[in-house]
Amino acid sequence: MRQIVDGLWEVDIGYVHAHLVEVDDHLVLIDTGLPRRSGKVVGAIEATGHKLADVRTILLTHRHPDHMGSLAELVRRTGAEVVAHRADVPVISGDLPQPLHSLAMRLTAPFMKAEGAPVDRVLDGDGPTGVPGISAVHTPGHTPGHLSYLLDRDGGVLFAGDAATVLFGRLRTPPRATTEDVAGAARSIDRLAGLDFRVAVFGHGRAVSGDAVSRFRDHAARR
């Protein structure tokens, strides 16, 4: 775990990140990481000086098991409200199976089985999340219901999820093998380039601090 800015921690869960945000006197968890890794998140919560009960909201970026894999267990342990986009809810809840649209996803599926959990607050697009100071931005492409989140603090903090990744210091679109609509994913990066934020954190790749939006605008200009 490492602190990105005051009150924001990046939690390393294998090859994917979850994030903890301090809001007033409680915590918001953005994504839950891989299946059977809830202990990593619990340890990070305690390391911030908080209790499990302080996690009142879990914001999900999308339905892939490396991002919602430990959701069900963490909901049981925290009682937190779960927020996600309507298009991804049937998979998150377990009502529908995870779509496996590439060979890579089919090969890894046996090791990435995630227990479903109910979604309490269903979003249809951009707008409020129910958490003061955090708004949702619909960024479809990687999945139809992918959401990024914008924290109105420290000049703006973007939680990009898998709308974009950072590889060798360069902003990139998410991998084709796990992205359902590659063209849509590129358009979503263009949308994010139109926002204002200084810091960006990602599901995969190192956080970018200081005029992070310029990375998105440069990427959009190259298209």
Image (cartoon, rainbow, N blue to C red):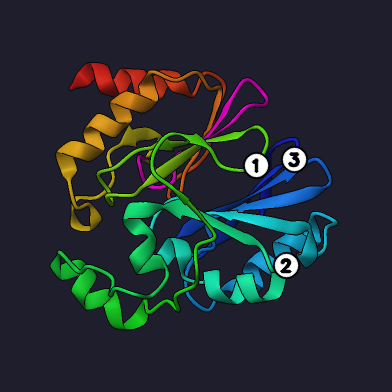
Q: Marks 1 and 2, how far apart in space?
A: 23 Å
Q: Marks 3 and 1, how far apart in space?
A: 15 Å
Residue range highlighted in magenta: 150-164
Name the amino acid, label 3.
Gly
* The C terminus lies in quadrant: top left
Q: Nearer the viewer, residue 160 or 86?
A: 86
Q: Nearer the viewer, residue 206 or 87?
A: 87
Instruction: Compare marks 3 and 1 and give the one earlier in the sequence.
Output: 3
At label 1, counting other C-alpha atoms closer than 10 Å, the crowd grade (few under 14, some 14-19, many 20 or more) is few
Position in image of residue 1 (x %, y %)? 66, 55
Say left or right for 222 vs 166.
left
Point 72% across, 67% down: residue:
43
Point 22% across, 52% down: residue:
179
Q: Nearer the viewer, residue 209 or 82?
A: 82
Q: Is residue 32 above or below residue 110?
A: above
Point 54% across, 62% down: residue:
32
At label 3, counting other C-alpha atoms closer than 10 Å, the crowd grade (few under 14, some 14-19, many 20 or more) is few
Point 42% across, 18% down: residue:
214
